Image (cartoon, helix red, strand yellow):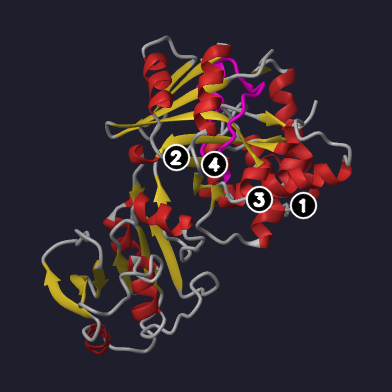
Amino acid sequence: MSILRPFAAVRPKSEYAASVAALPYDVMNSKEAARMAEGNPYSFLHVDKAEIDLPEGTDIYSDAVYAKAAENLNKLVTDGICIQEDSACLYLYRQVMNGRPQTGIVGCASIDDYLNNVIKKHEHTRADKEADRICHVDVCNANTGPIFLCYSRNAAVDGIIDRYLATEPLYDFTTTDGIRNTVWKIADRADIDILTESFAKIPALYIADGHHRCASAVKVGLQRRAENPDYTGEEEFNFFLAVCFRADELEIFDYNRLLKDTNGLTEDELLARLSVIFTIEEEKQAYKPVERHNFGLYLNKKWYSLTLKDGICDENDPVASLDVSVLQDYCIDPVFDIEDPRTSERIDFVGGIRGLEELERRCEEDAVCAFSMYPTSLEELMRIADAGEIMPPKSTWFEPKLLSGLFIHKLSD
């Protein structure tokens, strides 16, 4: 069973929602965050990227940054920008991007579901990134950014969603990137009961995005348990902020690769090495792959289509047959001599939302060639998670990103 629990959210007053809401902390650097928050004292980046309010050059992992984040979060409440609900509620959070809607249920998931693998993962996490968010959550005493979960369709949940979509929303605004964000509050106890009981019948939830935030929230919860040996399991630190979306509403974008050098190979030598694995055709324009095992290559201002030859990879292996695995195992490792893409400085990754033009631009600036990818599917993600396997790094890029600041989950009073 999957636990979804209502909570007494700290949230912006309706008139401030658009000003408070901000992109998640991990999609921009400090300078970009400072530019985004410039002139907006209510931006949640003052909480999630609090170094922007400290002297330039401040270590972003210093105690001063975490203390400033907690101070800024408290200030949003004391200044009357944010309020705390009087009772525990759930919410609907709907995003519309390029005409495609996705609607999630906002509530709290259980750290025990994460530990027992009811909440399924598909990525490894890095200790340094976990440590940062552990400090942030612990010092702020709150989950400030939601975890992006998905679930298999449930008729009773659909019925509640459809009914609330026809009512007046709590928030409704469009961000500068054209994404419409709409929120409804679910305070009716009968509706909350239907949703919690429906989720209890859903066998698993899947992390779509936010593995580091999720692992960090769980570890803070475990720390609080150790500090409170008489805990009952009902305390807020046993749960973390999440938005649960129906899997068939979501879209994964391509996650493309940039190479900083050709490992000493000439253009002809590189194409010759690749032709052992791929059928190669030169294209007249930027090439976006059209199916699995099809890739684009941008090299010396020319685009090529690369199609994997039959019998190369094990199609019965859910990880080995992923396109990101194919490219890594048969191209990037043996041809470019990059064994670990997580640590190599000779490779970079670009979310498909930026378009193929970004690959061309970067090849003029700091790279020599690029591979465009066919997106990983939700079915592949869930199959790998169900098998207890792990995807290679940078396998998925979800859009739109969930905004931070609309819902804050306090771990204790």
Q: CA distance from mark 1 to mark 3?
A: 29 Å
Marking on residue 24:
4
Q: Nearer the viewer, mark 3 or mark 4?
A: 3
For the residues bearing labels 2 and 4, Cβ distance under 8 angstroms: no
Q: Earlier in the sequence, mark 3 or mark 4?
A: 4
Marking on residue 151:
2
**Which residue is the site of mark 1?**
62
Q: Is residue 396 visible?
A: no
**Which residue is the site of mark 3?**
115
Residue closer to the observer: 245 or 196: 196
Q: CA distance from mark 3 to mark 4?
A: 24 Å
Q: CA distance from mark 2 to mark 1?
A: 37 Å
Which residue is depicted at the point 41% across and 56% down? 383
Q: Earlier in the sequence, mark 3 or mark 2?
A: 3
Q: CA distance from mark 4 to mark 1?
A: 20 Å
Q: CA distance from mark 2 to mark 4?
A: 22 Å
Neighbour tally class for label 2: few under 14, some 14-19, many 20 plus, Cα within 10 Å:
many
Q: Earlier in the sequence, mark 2 or mark 1?
A: 1
Which residue is depicted at the point 51% across and 15% down? 191
Q: Amino acid at mark 2?
A: Tyr
Query: Where's residue 212, x and y in %?
Result: 60, 52
In the image, residue 293 sits, relative to residue 48, either above or below, namely below
Q: Quadrant of the C terminus?
A: top right
Q: Amino acid at mark 1?
A: Ser
Query: Where's residue 365, x and y in %?
Result: 37, 67
The stretch of residues the image draws in magenta is 1-25
Q: Amino acid at mark 3?
A: Leu
